[in-house]
């Protein structure tokens, strides 16, 4: 409920934008290296609207050109879940993805690592309990 008493019907996070300089190169990376699937590829306001996601995910990543002179190569803050951070780290490294040298392991925190897409955008992979 809002302060006015009106109900809010927001129920999920739908899409998170990742700024990219070349949508096709980003698409090739996210589908070819990460194994994501295309959930939307169409026109929007005269531009290409492109969304990708892991199979079965409810939240997608929109691979969008930066707004105006907006930044690229950002810390997206996006955390992706995995059942096995060590195995995914090794697989991504073998696929030529720019990953951290090792999986981070801290007491009381799930194993995790960072990787970078071709534009240098940082995303995180966190092992789900």
Image: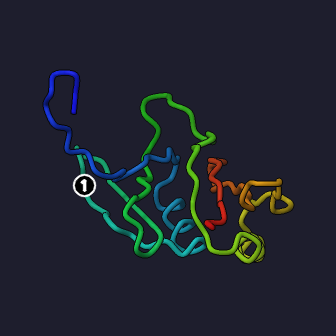
Q: Nearer the viewer, residue 43 or 114?
A: 114
The residue at which mark 1 appears reads as 43
What's the residue at 58%, 44% (across, down)?
77
Q: Quadrant of residue 104?
A: bottom right
The 10 Å Cα crowd at callout 1, few under 14, some 14 to 19, many 20 or more, is few
Q: Position of residue 66 (x, y in %)?
A: 47, 38
Q: Position of residue 122 (x, y in %)?
A: 65, 48
Q: Is residue 71 above or below residue 88?
A: above
Q: Quadrant of residue 55?
A: bottom left
Q: Nearer the viewer, residue 78 or 119?
A: 78
Q: Is residue 73 above or below residue 39?
A: above
Q: Quadrant of residue 117?
A: bottom right
What's the residue at 61%, 66% (across, down)?
128
- Count of numbered circles in the view: 1
Q: Quadrant of the N terminus?
A: top left
What's the residue at 77%, 71% (across, down)?
93
Q: Position of residue 4 (x, y in %)?
A: 16, 22
């Amino acid at each position: 409920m809002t302060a006015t008493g009106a109900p809010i019907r927001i129920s999920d996070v739908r899409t998170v934008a990742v700024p990219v300089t070349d949508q096709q190169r980003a698409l090739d990376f996210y589908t070819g290296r990460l194994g994501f699937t295309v959930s939307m590829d169409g026109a929007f306001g005269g531009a290409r609207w492109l969304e990708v996601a892991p199979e079965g995910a409810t939240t997608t990543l929109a691979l969008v050109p930066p707004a105006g002179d907006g930044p690229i190569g950002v810390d997206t803050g996006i955390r992706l879940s995995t059942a096995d951070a060590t195995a995914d780290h090794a697989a991504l490294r073998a696929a030529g993805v720019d990953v951290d040298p090792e999986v981070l392991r801290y007491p009381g925190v799930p194993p995790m690592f960072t990787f970078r897409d071709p534009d240098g955008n940082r995303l995180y992979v966190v092992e789900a309990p």
